[in-house]
Image (cartoon, grey):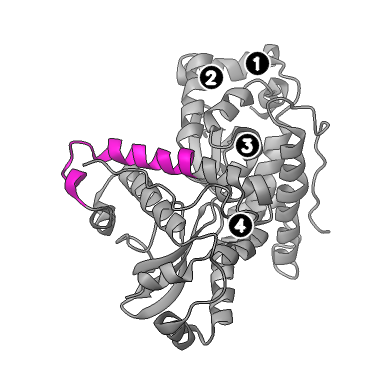
Amino acid sequence: MPFELPKLPYEYDALVPVISKQTLEFHHDKHHAAYVNNLNNLTKGTEFEEMEIIDIILKAKGGIFNNAAQVWNHTFYFDQFGKNKIEKLRGELLIAINSSFGSFDEFKEKFSNAAKTLFGSGWTWLVKKPNGSLDIVQSTNAENPLTEGLIPILTCDVWEHAYYLDYQNKRPDYISGFWTIIDWEVISLRY
Amino acid sequence: MAFELPQLSYDYNALEPNIDARTMEIHHTKHHAGYTNNLNNAIKDTELDNLSIEDILKNISKQSVAVRNNGGGFYNHKLFWEIMSPNGGGEPNGDLLNAINKDFGSFSVFKELFNKAAATRFGSGWAWLVNQGGKLVVTSTPNQDNPLMDLAEVKGAPILGLDVWEHAYYLKYQNKRPEYIDAFWNVVDWDQVAKSFV
């Protein structure tokens, strides 16, 4: 069974004005789709062909890793947006954020700073460590915290293709907007 | 002595339709200017303050990440603007063409190798034609690294460079990096490249 491109869980214009329809169309229909196609081509006839994507990420290297991780990263990224629902951020996740970072605002500042300062292409992640506490990590290109034994909770794609049509060199503006489209119900369930 | 953002020797719209004016302007006045400012801030009041950019890059493994990223970004973009021209395109001639034929077999084989290096560089980076004391090689580097850096896998003097960060082509080509690479050949200033091949 070949890997399939998941549909977006909302319309292409659902995240306007933070992320334009055009950006989402390219990001999902071209970039995400290309990673899925590449993964299918590269894994055909190999031991990876029938594996779960997470297992490929944990075992593969080189092109197969890059494409598998980018398939997973983009699905994870697109799934976390929608109606903001900040009121859904409560309970265990909020307690963990407060105890790991001091407050939600301090978490936001630290995460934003990590996303702004990541040099080149990559991702910024909120992750859950094995002891249940939270941390913020940056990853280069396709890299994914799963390979470090960390559980991803939230991610920000800072490849330029994620924001260049809308913000050009102004990555900080994209990151400010990012906070207003997160569906905290999805994020809370991940924790 | 602070580094200065170099002026372009042509207008922002001069490379149209291969590279659009808006991309050129943002690339030069925002990205390249950003690297230049950040480099100056990173070397201010250090022993690097009086060195040439080449001398800074050749011992980059001893420097901070900020000097590596911004020093590379300053140098790479400067070279990139210089090797392009509205009167570019075509093929090299003279000693440079002879060297390309000797080291790659033909100009078209070289182009194919360079295209592949540029197209397959995953994430952000650069493709290069490098002079290793008379021998030419094609390579690519991640982010703003370059072959002058002591930590580069393939070292030498870059004589041709292509920026494959998405900011270099996304406004016009979006995900179609190979089309941008094809268009690049129409604006390569081979006379300029030949000058640095000594």
**Front position in the image: B150 or B99:** B99
Say which amino acid is labelled 1.
Leu
Marks 2 and 1: in contact by CB < 8 Å?
yes
Classed neighbour count for the residue bearing mark 3: other residues with Cα under 10 Å, few (<14), some (14–19), many (≥20): many
Label 3 vs 4, first from the N-terminus: 4
Q: CA distance from mark 1 to mark 4?
A: 33 Å
**Badge 2: chain ID:** A
| Whether residue B82 is situated above or below residue B170 in the rendered picture | below
- Residue A163 lies left or right of residue B150; in this view the side is right
Say which amino acid is labelled 2.
Ile
Quadrant including the N terminus of chain B: top left
Label 3 vs 2, first from the N-terminus: 2
Say which amino acid is labelled 4.
Phe
Label 1 vs 2, first from the N-terminus: 1
Residue A163 — which label?
3
**Eye-nearest disc, 4 or 2:** 4
Which residue matches tag 1? A89
In the image, what residue occupies the spot 74% across and 26% down?
A16
- Residue B42's spot in the image, x, y percent? 28, 38
Q: CA distance from mark 1 to mark 2?
A: 10 Å
**Badge 3: chain ID:** A
Q: CA distance from mark 4 to mark 2?
A: 31 Å
- Residue A23 lies left or right of residue B96; in this view the side is right
Magenta residue span: B28-51
**Badge 4: chain ID:** A
Label 3 vs 1, first from the N-terminus: 1
| Whether residue A87 is situated above or below residue B106 in the rendered picture | above
- Residue B85's spot in the image, x, y percent? 51, 60
- Residue A177's spot in the image, x, y percent? 62, 24
Q: CA distance from mark 3 to mark 1?
A: 26 Å
Which residue matches tag 4? A65
Which residue matches tag 2? A97
